[in-house]
RNA sequence: GGUUCCUUGGCCGAGUGGCUAGGCACCGGUCUGCAAAACCGUUUACGGCGGUUCGAAUCCGCCAGGAACCUCCA
């Protein structure tokens, strides 16, 4: 390894060399979904981004503890302190237990993640399973003097906190100004200031999810779960915290404030944020109603989609852009990704069948190095992919008989492709259910061998019939110099 | 209004001072019974105007357009 991993830290707004606190151990926390609806394209972005990070850190030899939470309580609609709990609302509408709603959407989320070949995290804690930890965390903030109790709810005192610490350091918000302009107390609210946020909320009578606490029968504020669960599983200081850019404010800013107030120190060393997926230049999101669920992508059932897209196409589409860029959805862009992915994976299949020669006419020696370099540069997956395409051109040249490759180079190329395509980018190479059955494979081979004989006898009718009928069934048939290739 | 960021060829999308990104599409060619695939070649760029520099897509300023956050969102 000639390179050091550098990652962009939102705190400093620049790339920094990654130095773990307790190498080889690495703590990674990523904000997971609020499970009150089906996962959409937007959910796939952080999942895939941090899956790539998880895989790469592991490849570098780190022992990663990856925590991705499940928000199943406390996430309110409309206003952080006034709206209805999202899970509870869904449960009310569907006349179900809140946990029934949670389990249903969580199962579907897991299924989608598995399809996208996103590795499961080491720990997937539920907010509702850590109420005690959250109550203790709130108590610590109260004890430290940075929170106040009002009508059974507990609020974070942003003004007091900002006298000693920097509230706004992550989002770049200037809180001094806001404090000036909101000096007047708002008599309508339990809160002293509009910018104060809830650590614990007293449950209104209609709320169906509530727990006992020293202050009231109620539930934790949304930001609380990440502070409590992150520090519980990764320690009071840990390495990386990730999530979508839209969570920077208020969620992550509040998390920093909570942890700093309670523990007196910075908990997170590197903050990483993936950018948004847009549709017609606008953010794709639940609240905007312009989202397409992952299920709809896989089946092509959304009206905006001209076809179905496989999970691997979605994954490749996302990896073809850098995680800190916005990426704009369109059928055209997805179809381009689909074709590109096919090209890449077909050359990978061809690679397995190449015959070595005494010498090489293709250059493969620095491929591994170039790919590692790109990954180390803040996970630049598009560059990795461009290098792999260069290599796939070399593979095709050799496969066509227009070049040669030595045994040494061939082994290196196989090793690099396996590492980057399968292990790191996580692109599954074949549909294992359909092509792994030997009898099935041999039957297709038999048909195509019959076609080959027909071709030799210039029996084009038989030859074309076999090709056309197989094509109709969804196969792709390609003639090569001395035989054929096929796929589904 | 405040904060942050973006504008690259027909489309997507890297690149942050000099060296062909890459993919998709298009066109020409090789191969093929035909087709597909593959390979070779070609074409289309850095929002506008200034500035710094020997040299700028890349740095600085202004202008235009767009986005995210400031209320829940990945």
Image (cartoon, grey):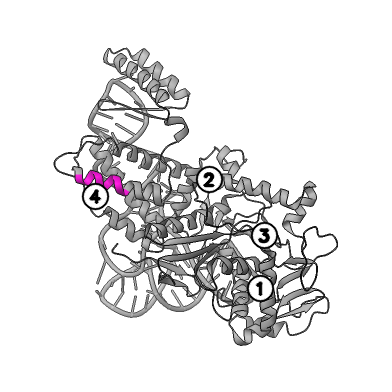
Q: Label 2: which residue?
A: A114
Same chain, labels 4 and 1: yes
Residue A146 in sight here: no
Q: Horizontal placement of A337 versus A459: left or right?
A: right
Q: Earlier in the sequence, mark 4 or mark 1?
A: 1
The answer to whether the residue labelled 3 contacts the one labelled 2, judged by CB atoms less than 8 Å apart, is no
In what quadrant of the picture does the C terminus of chain A appear? top left
Q: Label 1: which residue?
A: A137
Q: Earlier in the sequence, mark 3 or mark 2?
A: 2
The answer to whether the residue labelled 4 contacts the one labelled 1, judged by CB atoms less than 8 Å apart, is no
Q: Horizontal placement of A205 versus A442: left or right?
A: right
Give the residue displayed 70% in from the left and 70% down from the top: A135
- In this view of the protein, which residue sits in the foreground, A437 or A235? A235
Residue lying at the far left of the rendered structure: A358
Residue A215 within the magenta-colored segment of the rendering? no
Q: Label 3: which residue?
A: A129
x, y percent for residue B13:
44, 55
Q: Chain of mark 3?
A: A
Q: Could you tell me how far apart the alpha carbons at marks 1 and 2 are, in whole angstroms?
A: 33 Å
Kindly identify which numbered label has been placed on residue A364: 4
Say what secondary structure mark 2 lies in.
helix
Same chain, labels 1 and 2: yes
Say what secondary structure mark 1 lies in.
helix
x, y percent for residue A352:
30, 38
Kindly identify which numbered label has been placed on residue A255: none
10 Å crowding of disc 4: few (<14), some (14-19), many (20+): some
């Amino acid at each position: 390894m000639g390179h050091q991993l550098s990652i962009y830290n939102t705190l400093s707004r620049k790339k920094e060399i990654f130095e773990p606190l307790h190498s080889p151990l690495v703590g990674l926390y990523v904000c997971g979904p609020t499970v009150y609806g089906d996962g959409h394209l937007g959910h796939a972005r952080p999942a895939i981004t941090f899956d790539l990070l998880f895989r790469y850190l592991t490849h570098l030899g780190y022992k990663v503890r990856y925590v991705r939470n499940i928000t199943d309580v406390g996430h309110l609609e409309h206003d952080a302190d006034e709206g209805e709990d999202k899970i509870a609302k869904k449960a009310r509408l569907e006349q179900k237990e809140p946990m029934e709603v949670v389990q249903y959407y969580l199962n579907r989320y897991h299924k989608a993640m598995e399809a996208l070949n996103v590795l499961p995290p080491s720990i997937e804690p539920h907010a509702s399973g850590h109420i005690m930890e959250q109550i203790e965390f709130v108590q610590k903030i109260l004890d430290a003097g940075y929170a106040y109790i009002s009508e059974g709810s507990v609020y974070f005192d942003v003004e007091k906190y900002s006298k000693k610490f920097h509230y706004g350091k992550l989002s770049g918000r200037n809180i001094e100004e806001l404090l000036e302009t909101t000096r007047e107390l708002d008599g309508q609210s339990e809160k002293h200031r509009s910018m104060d946020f809830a650590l614990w909320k007293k449950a209104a009578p209609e709320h169906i999810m509530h727990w006992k606490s020293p202050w009231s029968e109620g539930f934790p504020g949304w930001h609380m779960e990440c502070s409590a669960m992150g520090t519980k599983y990764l320690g009071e200081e840990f390495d990386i915290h990730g999530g979508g850019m839209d969570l920077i404010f208020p969620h992550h800013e509040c998390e920093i404030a909570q942890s700093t107030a309670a523990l007196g120190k910075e908990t997170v060393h590197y903050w990483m944020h993936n950018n948004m997926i847009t549709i017609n230049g606008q953010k794709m999101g639940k609240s905007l109603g312009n989202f397409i669920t992952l299920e709809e992508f896989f089946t092509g059932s959304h009206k905006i989609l001209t076809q179905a897209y496989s999970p691997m196409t979605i994954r490749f589409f996302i990896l073809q852009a850098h995680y800190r860029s916005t990426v704009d959805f369109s059928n055209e862009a997805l179809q381009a990704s689909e074709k590109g992915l096919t090209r890449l994976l077909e050359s990978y299949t061809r690679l397995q069948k190449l015959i070595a020669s005494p010498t090489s006419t293709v250059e493969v020696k620095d491929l591994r190095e170039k790919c590692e370099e790109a990954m180390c540069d803040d996970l630049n997956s598009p560059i990795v992919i461009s290098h792999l395409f260069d290599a796939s051109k070399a593979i095709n040249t050799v496969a066509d008989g227009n070049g040669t490759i030595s045994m040494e180079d061939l082994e290196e190329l196989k090793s690099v492709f396996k590492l980057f395509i399968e292990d790191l980018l996580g692109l599954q190479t074949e549909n294992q259910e359909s092509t792994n059955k030997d009898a099935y494979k041999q039957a297709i081979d038999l048909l195509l061998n019959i076609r080959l004989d027909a071709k030799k006898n210039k029996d084009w009718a038989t030859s074309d019939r076999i090709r056309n009928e197989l094509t109709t069934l969804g196969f792709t048939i390609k003639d090569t110099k001395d035989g054929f290739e096929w796929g589904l």
